[in-house]
Image (cartoon, rainbow, N blue to C red):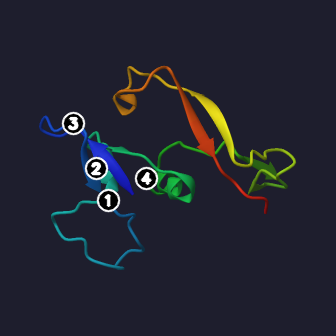
């Protein structure tokens, strides 16, 4: 996972962080406090797909808009409710947000998915 941080005037410096494993799985050492501290210190993590699950590990109130609750169980939306195979979509962007530096207020994005 990659993130961009603003620390000591070094805006946009790439920082790599791993998702913490189970307790005791490995010792990260004192020099790597992990993603929780990184986010608490103002860092930004950009996660795509299943890597977005880190939000739950960090206790962030983030959820997927592409799921539904069926009989009390969360599941991915079936293709008859959401299917956009290999399409170019238009996305609204907030150019005032530092993460959108250099973007206009609209951007084209490629969405690829397969039937399951």
The extreme left residue here reads 8
CA gap between label 4 and label 1 equals: 13 Å
Labels 1 & 3 near each other (Cβ < 8 A)? no
| Callout 3 secondary element | loop
| Callout 1 secondary element | loop
Crowding near pointer 4: few (<14 within 10 Å), some, many (20+)?
A: some
Q: Earlier in the sequence, mark 2 or mark 1?
A: 1
Labels 2 & 1 near each other (Cβ < 8 A)? yes
Rendered image: mark on residue 11: 3
Labels 4 & 1 near each other (Cβ < 8 A)? no
Instruction: Name the residue tied to disc 1.
Output: 17
In the rendered structure, the answer to whether residue 84 lies left or right of residue 44 reads right
Quarter occupied by the N terminus: bottom left
CA gap between label 2 and label 1 equals: 9 Å
CA gap between label 1 and label 3 equals: 17 Å
Instruction: Name the residue tied to disc 2.
Output: 38
Q: Quadrant of residue 32?
A: bottom left
Q: Earlier in the sequence, mark 2 or mark 3?
A: 3
Instruction: Name the residue tied to disc 4.
Output: 58
Q: Earlier in the sequence, mark 1 or mark 3?
A: 3
The extreme right residue here reads 80
Q: Quadrant of residue 35?
A: bottom left
Image x and y of residue 90, in percent: 62, 29
């Amino acid at each position: 996972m990659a993130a961009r941080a603003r620390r000591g005037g070094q805006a946009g410096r790439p920082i790599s962080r791993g998702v913490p494993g189970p307790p005791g799985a490995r010792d990260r050492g004192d020099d790597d406090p992990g993603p929780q501290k990184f986010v608490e210190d103002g860092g930004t993590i950009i996660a795509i797909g299943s890597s977005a699950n880190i939000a739950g590990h960090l206790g962030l109130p983030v959820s997927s808009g592409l799921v539904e609750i069926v009989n009390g169980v969360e599941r991915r939306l079936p293709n008859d409710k959401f299917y956009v195979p290999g399409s170019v979509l238009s996305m609204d962007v907030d150019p005032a947000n530092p993460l959108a530096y250099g973007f206009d207020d609209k951007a084209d994005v490629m969405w690829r998915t397969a039937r399951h």
